[in-house]
Image: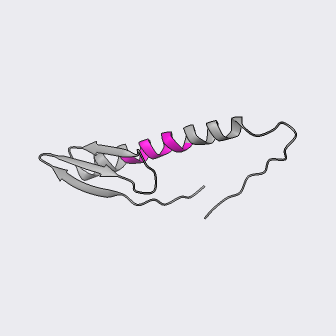
Amino acid sequence: MHNEFTAVFERDGEWYIAYCPEIPGANGQGRTKQEARENLAQAIALILADRREDALHSIPPEAERETVTIE
C-alpha cells in the first residue's frame, strides 16, 4: 500500500525536529534531516498500526470485512 503524508521540519540547535500534521502525535527527530524523516516515518507507521488494531477490535464478528487500497 502506498500512502503519502506531509513532513514538516524545523531546526532546534543541532537537531532537526519533524512532525506530520495529518497524524497527531507523529513526531521525529535526528541530527540530520534524513534521520528525522526516518524517525518520523517509523512513528507514523506505529501510530497507524496501533489505531488499526484498536479499530478492528470493535468490529462485530458477523460483519463482512474487505481490504480497500488507496493509491
Left or right: 18 as drawn, with respect to 15: right
* Magenta-colored span: 40-48
12 relative to 62, above or below: below
Left or right: 43 as drawn, with respect to 16: right
Q: Is residue 46 magenta?
A: yes
Q: Residue at x 36, y 57 (%)?
A: 7
Residue 18 spot, x, y in % from top left:
30, 51
Residue 51 spot, x, y in % from top left:
57, 41
Image quadrant in which you'd find residue 54: top right
Residue 65 spot, x, y in % from top left:
80, 47
Number of numbered discs on residues = 0
User: Residue most toward the bottom?
Assistant: 71
**Which secondary structure class fits the magenta region best?**
helix
Left or right: 12 as drawn, with respect to 44: left
Left or right: 32 as drawn, with respect to 67: left
7 relative to 26, above or below: below
Q: Residue at x 63, y 62 (%)?
A: 70
Quadrant in which the N terminus is drawn: bottom right
Q: Nearer the viewer, residue 14 or 20?
A: 20
User: Residue most toward the right?
Assistant: 62
Q: Residue at x 84, y 36 (%)?
A: 61
User: Residue most toward the left?
Assistant: 13
Q: Is residue 22 magenta?
A: no
Q: Nearer the viewer, residue 10 or 24?
A: 24
21 relative to 40, above or below: below
Quadrant in which the C terminus is drawn: bottom right
